[in-house]
C-alpha cells in the first residue's frame, strides 16, 4: 500500500516512522510519503490561508496550493500494471463534519492501493477542493469522533495506525487480529498478568483454574457486563440469536432480555442502571 500525507506541519507525522508503521515501511509493506503543503505555494510568503467569504472567525485554507499538491501526488504513481486502469486513489479529508471513521472503515481502506490524507488546519479547506478532487480521487471526508481538534494531523496518525496494522504482515501475531474479528462488536474483556496477587489485589481465580471452557465463558460475560455498563449503544447491534442459556442469563442479570434475536433493555423496575 502507498500512503501520501499533505500537511503544513509535516514534522507532526514523524511518529509514523516509529514502531509498527515504521517497521511496515522498513519491511516494504507500506510506502509512506509526507508532503509540505507550503512547497506547492507560489507567493513569497508561502501563504496557505485567507479570510472566509461570508465572514466569521478564523481563516480558511486557500484552494490552489491544495490542487497543486493533490495533482502532484495523483500524478506520481505507478502506471496500471494490467489491462484494467489503475483504481482512483482514495482521498481522506479529516474533518469534524466527516463520516465517522470506524474499524469497518479501517478494513475497507486497508484494501486500497493508494490512500492520500489531506490535513487541514484553521477552519478547514475551501469546499471547492473536495469537489475538484472528485475527478482524480474517491473523496471521503472522515471524522475521528465528536470532539474538536485543531487540525487533521492527529486524526491521520490514528487512522494510519488503525489501517496499517490490518495490512498483511504488519501485526506480528495475526492471532490478535483474528481474536478481534471474533469480538462481535463488544468491548474487550479485562486482561491480567503476573504476579497473581499484586498490592492485595488478586487475579480472578477462574483465570488460574486451567478450565478453558469456564475461562472463555467468564471472559464473554465480562464483555457483556462492560459493554452494558460503558457502551450500551453497542448492544443494539449484537446478534443474541443463538446464545447459550448461561449467556442469556448473564444478560438477564444485566437487565436485558432477548427478543427476536436482539437484546432489549427490560422496562425500568426502579432507579438507575441496575
Ligand atoms: C479540524 C476545526 C472546523 C472547527 C482541520 C478538525 C476531527 N474528530 C475530529 N475533530 N476535529 C477534527 C478536525 C479535522 C481536521 C481539521 N480543524 C479545526 N475545523 C471547525 C475547528 C481544521 C477529525 N478528523
Image (cartoon, rainbow, N blue to C red):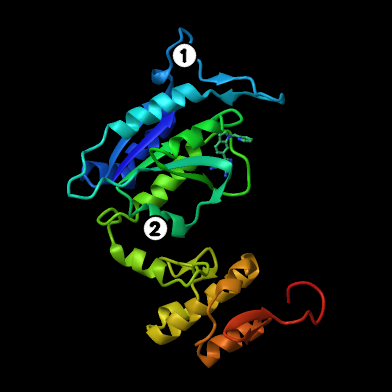
Residue at 57% x, 85% y is 261
Crowd tier of the residue under label 2, counting other residues whose Cα lies within 10 Å: few below 14, some 14–19, many 20 or above: some
* Residue 211 visible, this angle: no
Crowd tier of the residue under label 1, counting other residues whose Cα lies within 10 Å: few below 14, some 14–19, many 20 or above: few
- From the viewer's side, name the closer residue of 64 and 267: 64
Ligand 1 quadrant in view? top right
Establish if 145 lies above or below 54: below
Q: Is residue 271 left or right of residue 96?
A: right
Residue at 33% x, 28% y is 72
What is the quadrant of residue 21 in the picture?
Answer: top left
Find disc 2 in the rendering and name its residue: 107
- Can you name the residue that lies furthest to the left here? 82
Query: What SS does tag 2 mark?
Result: helix
First of labels 1, 2 by sequence position: 1
- Can you name the residue that lies furthest to the bottom here? 245
Establish if 63 lies above or below 261: above
List x then y, in percent, for residue 177. Answer: 35, 64
List x then y, in percent, for residue 224. Answer: 56, 75
List x then y, in percent, for residue 115. Answer: 36, 43
* Labelled disc at residue 46: 1
What is the quadrant of residue 236 in the picture?
Answer: bottom right
Query: What SS does tag 1 mark?
Result: loop
- From the viewer's side, name the closer residue of 129 and 260: 129
Mark 1 and mark 2: Cα distance apart in space: 37 Å
Q: Is residue 147 left or right of residue 158?
A: right
Quick check: is the Cβ at mark 1 less than 8 Å away from ligand 1?
no
Quarter of the picture holding the C terminus: bottom right
Amino acid at each position: 500500500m502507498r500512503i501520501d500525507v499533505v500537511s503544513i506541519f509535516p514534522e507532526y507525522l514523524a511518529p509514523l516512522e516509529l514502531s509498527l508503521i515504521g517497521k511496515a515501511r522498513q519491511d516494504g509493506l507500506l510506502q509512506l510519503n509526507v508532503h509540505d503543503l507550503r512547497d506547492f505555494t507560489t507567493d513569497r510568503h508561502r501563504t496557505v490561508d485567507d479570510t472566509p467569504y461570508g465572514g466569521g472567525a478564523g481563516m480558511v485554507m486557500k484552494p490552489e496550493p491544495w490542487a497543486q499538491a493533490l495533482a502532484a501526488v495523483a500524478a506520481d504513481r505507478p502506471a496500471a500494471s494490467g489491462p484494467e486502469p489503475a483504481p482512483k486513489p482514495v482521498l481522506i479529508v479529516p474533518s469534524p463534519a466527516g463520516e465517522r471513521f470506524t474499524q469497518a472503515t479501517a478494513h475497507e481502506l486497508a484494501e486500497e492501493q493508494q490512500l492520500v490524507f489531506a490535513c487541514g488546519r484553521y477552519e478547514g479547506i475551501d469546499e471547492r477542493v473536495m469537489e475538484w478532487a472528485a475527478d482524480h480521487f474517491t473523496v471521503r471526508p472522515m471524522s475521528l469522533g465528536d470532539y474538536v481538534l485543531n487540525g487533521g494531523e492527529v486524526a491521520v496518525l490514528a487512522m494510519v495506525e488503525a489501517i496499517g496494522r490490518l495490512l498483511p504482515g504488519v501485526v506480528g501475531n495475526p492471532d490478535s487480529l483474528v481474536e478481534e474479528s471474533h469480538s462481535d462488536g463488544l468491548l474487550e474483556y479485562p486482561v491480567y498478568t503476573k504476579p497473581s496477587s499484586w498490592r492485595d489485589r488478586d487475579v480472578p481465580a477462574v483465570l488460574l483454574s486451567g478450565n478453558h471452557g469456564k475461562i472463555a465463558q467468564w471472559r464473554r460475560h465480562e464483555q457483556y457486563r462492560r459493554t452494558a455498563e460503558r457502551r450500551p449503544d453497542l448492544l443494539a447491534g449484537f446478534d443474541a440469536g443463538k446464545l447459550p442459556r448461561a449467556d442469556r442469563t448473564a444478560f438477564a442479570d444485566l437487565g436485558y432480555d432477548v427478543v427476536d434475536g436482539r437484546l432489549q433493555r427490560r422496562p425500568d423496575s426502579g432507579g438507575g442502571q441496575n
